[in-house]
Amino acid sequence: MYAQVIVDVPHVETDKPFDYHIPSELRPHLTIGSRVSAPFGNRKIQGYVVGLSETTSVKKARDLEDVLDVVPPLTPELIELGEWMSERYLCRRYVSFQAMLPAALRSSYKKSLSLTEDGKQITLLIPQERQLMRFIEEKQPIDYDQLLKNFPGEKSFLLKALREGWLQAEQVVKDKVTRKTLLYVIKAESDQTLQQAAEALPKQASKQREILQFMLDLQHPIALRDLLAQLSASQSSAQALVSKGLLKMEEVEERRDPYAGRAFEQEAKVVFTPEQREVIDEIVFALNRPQPFSYLLRGVTGSGKTEVYLETIEHCLQMDRQAIVLVPEISLTPQMVNRFKAKFGDQVAVLHSGLSRGERYDEWRMIREGKVNVAVGARSAIFAPFTKLGLIIIDEEHEGSYKQEENPRYHAREVAKKRAELHGAVTVFGSATPALESYYEATKTETGLLEMPYRVNRRPMPSVSVVDMRDELKQGNRSMFSRLLAQGIETRLSRGEQMVLFLNRRGFSTFVMCRSCGHSLQCPHCDISLTYHRSNQTVRCHYCGHTERDASECPDCGSKHIRYFGTGTQKVEEELSRHFPGIRVIRMDVDTTGRKGSHEKWLTQFREGKGEVLLGTQMIAKGLDFPKVTLVGVIAADTILGMPDFRAAERTFQLLTQVGGRAGRHELPGEVIIQSYNPDHYSIQLAKNHDFEKFFAMEMKHRYEQNYPPFYRLVLFTFSSPDVPLVVKKADEWVKQLKRKLPSSVYLLGPVASPIPRIKDRYRFQCMIKYRDEADILSQIKLLSDSFIYANRNEDIGLTIDVDPHMLM
Ligand code: ADP
Ligand code: ZN
Ligand code: ZN
C-alpha cells in the first residue's frame, strides 16, 4: 500500500502529493486525513495523507515513519476543501490543511501516553507487551518517542493499544502541557493532631492557625488558590504548614472547561413573530431537501435573527445533522454564548481566541470525535471537523473579520458555501447591513433572500441626528462634544440612564507632532506615524510594535513644544471627566482588553451599572444588548470615510447602522447622535434614515462606474524587499508578464508604492488586477506566480497574492 502525502516543505515544487510506502504495522492506523511523519531528503517532516493506492509509479517510494494521531485530524471532506482553497486562494495545500486545525496540532509536537482504566484491566497480553504496559503505568505520562527508543520492536502494539483505548495519547505542545492541573491542599495528619498543632502555634502564626482551622472545618481537600483567596493568606503560610508535615499538596487534574462553574440561564421559549415563523419555515424546508442551498437573511438589529438561528439549529439536530455558527470574534460575548449553551447545553463547542491553546484543542477534539453537534466560533470555526453538516450560519456576514488576512487568505462565506456544497447543507448569512456582494447575489441568483424588516414587538428604530462639526467650530465650540451630544450626555446622567460612546479605532489619529517644526514621530522601520499611549507614556508602532519612551523634545529641531494630537479613546475619556465631573467611564479598546477575560469584565461592570458611559472602539459596535442604554454617540463618523479603500462608504454605512442598533432595544426609547465633518455624505445620511436599499442602489452605481466588486473581481499583488531597486524591478517585471499573458479585458493597475510603503524594514510595492469573473484567470496567475517564485528563489523578495482583497494596503 502507498499513501499520497502533502508534505510540509515550503517550495512551489513540493506543493503536490508525494508517494510513500506504508509499512504493514502502520497500515491499520492510517487513512485519508491522517497526519504522518515521513523522511524527506535527509530530514523528517510532517504531512497529510490525501490518497491511498495499491501501486505507485515511483521507483523507490520511501517508508512512512509514523502516524501522529489516533483519530485523523482531517476528514476526506476537509481534504477536498483544502484542495479547493489552494486553487481558490493561490496558496500551498499544506498551508490550507494547517489552517483547518487548532494551533496545538500545528506546532512541533510531542505525544505522551498513559494507561486508561481499560488498559489497567487488560490481561491477554504476551510477556513483552505486559512488561511494556507496566513500564508505562509506572512512568506515565511518558513521552512516546522516548518509549519507542526503549521498546523499539513494540510500535505496532502501541498503535493497537491506542486504537483499542488501552492507552491514551495527549499532544504535549512544546513545553506547554495541554492537560491542566491544580494544586490541592490536603490534611496530612489526623484531626486531633492538627487541632493540637493549631493550638500550639505561636501568636505570630495566626494565618497558619486560621488555615488549619479552615481545613478542619472543611473536611475535604481544596484547591490551594481557592484556600488562599478565601483566607487572604499567602502561599508561604500554607507552605510552612506543609514543611511541618501537617498539610500536604497534590496536583490534581482539572477538566478544562472554559465555561465550567457557570450556570446557563434557561431562556423562556419565545412566541415567534409572523416574520420569524416564515423565515424559519423556509430554512427548515431547505434543510429537508438533499441539495445545498444558500440564504441571505436581512434583518434589522433586534429583529430576532438569533432566535431564528437557534430554532433552525434545533431542527437540524433533530435530523441528526450538525451545525456551525460563525459570529465575529468581538460578538462572541458571554451573552451570545449563553444563548446557545442554554438551548443546546453540552452539545455545543465554543471556539474563540480567548481560549488557551489547550482549551481550544479540547473543544476541537469534541467536535472531531462527534461528541458535540454545534460549533459556535469566530472565523476559523468554519473548519469545525463535523462529518454530518446540515446548517452553516454566519451572523453579521458583512463583517471584514471573516476574511483572513494571512495565508490562506480565505473568506469564511465562500468556504461555508463550499462546505455546504460538499455536504448538501444549507447556509444562512445574516446581517442588518449585508455586504454589497451578498445582497447583489441574493437579488440576482439562486440565493434566497429572507427579510425581517421590523424589530421584535415593533419597537421603533432609534431616532438618529447628524451633527455638523464644522458648524460647531464656527459657533466657537472647540471641544470634541457637540452641543447636542453634550446635552444628551447631561440628560442621561440626570436620568440615571446609560450611554455608549463610539470612537472608530484606537489611537487612529493620536500621533505625536512638534508644534514648532511640524515634525511627527515616525516608526524607524515602517513608514507610519507612531501612536501615543498615555497609560504608560510611550509611543508605539501598530505594525511592528516598535516602542519609544514619550519624546519630550523634538528629535528634529529640539523644541520642547512636542505633543500628541487627535482623539484616541484615552483622550475622550479625559475630556469626558473634564466636562462632566464625576462621570464614570468604562473604556474598552485594545489597550484595556488585552488580558484574557478583561473584555467580559468591563461589560459586566457596565451591565451592573458601575459606569454611565461605555466608551470604545469597533469592539463595542455590535452584539451588545443593554436595557438601560438610551443614547449612542459617534464621536467622529469620518475616520473610515477617509481610508484609501473602495469599501470606505460601505464600511461607514454598516458601522453607523450597527452602532445605532445598540440603542433603544428595550422599553426605553433610544437616540443616536452622529458627529461628522462630512454630514452630507450619502453613507451617513442613509444610515441616519435606516435606508439600506437606497444605499445599496447608490453604492452599486459607484462600483459599476469604477469597475469594482461585485461587478469586477480584484487580485492584489504585494512585493516586499529590503532592497528598493530590486522590489521596483521585480514589480515592473511582474506587471509586464501579466500584460503579456492575461486577456486584454483584464485591467492592470500599478505598480505603485503601497499605502504603507515600508513595514519592518521591507519596502512594499503593489499592483492590482480587475477582471470579470473568468474562471481560468486564477489558474493562469497561479502558473505565473509559481514560476516567479521559482525564478526568484535566491532573492530576498516576497510576493503575497490576495484574491478578493479586503484591505488594500
Ligand atoms: P437580532 O439577532 O436580530 O439582533 P435577537 O434574536 O437577538 O435579534 O432578538 C432581539 C431581542 O428580542 C432578544 O432579546 C430576543 O430574546 C428577543 N426576541 C426575539 N424574538 C422574539 C419573539 N418572537 N418574541 C419576543 N422576544 C423576542
Ligand atoms: Zn520640531
Ligand atoms: Zn514599525
Image (cartoon, grey):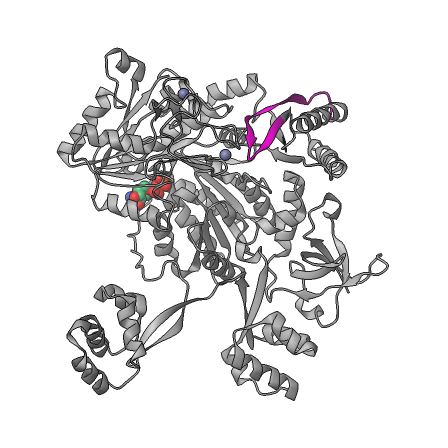
Name the side, left or right, on which 77 lies relative to 608.
Answer: right
Name the side, left or right, on which 412 lies relative to 679.
Answer: right
Residue 423: where, in percent of width, then height?
A: 58, 50
Which residue sits at x=15%, y=74%? Answer: 203
Q: Which residues are magenta?
A: 742-766
Which residue sits at x=39%, y=72%? Answer: 252
Classified by dominant secondary structure, the portion drawn in magenta counts as strand
Q: Residue furthest right?
A: 59
Residue 792: where, in percent of width, then height?
A: 74, 36
Residue 367: where, in percent of width, then height?
A: 50, 59
Which residue sits at x=32%, y=41%? Answer: 624
Q: In terms of depth relative to the viewer, which is nearer, 758 or 634?
A: 758
Residue 767, placed above or below residue 606: above
Residue 435: where, in percent of width, then height?
A: 48, 31
Which quarter of the frame holds ligand 2? top left
Magenta span has 629? no
Report whether residue 689 is seen.
no
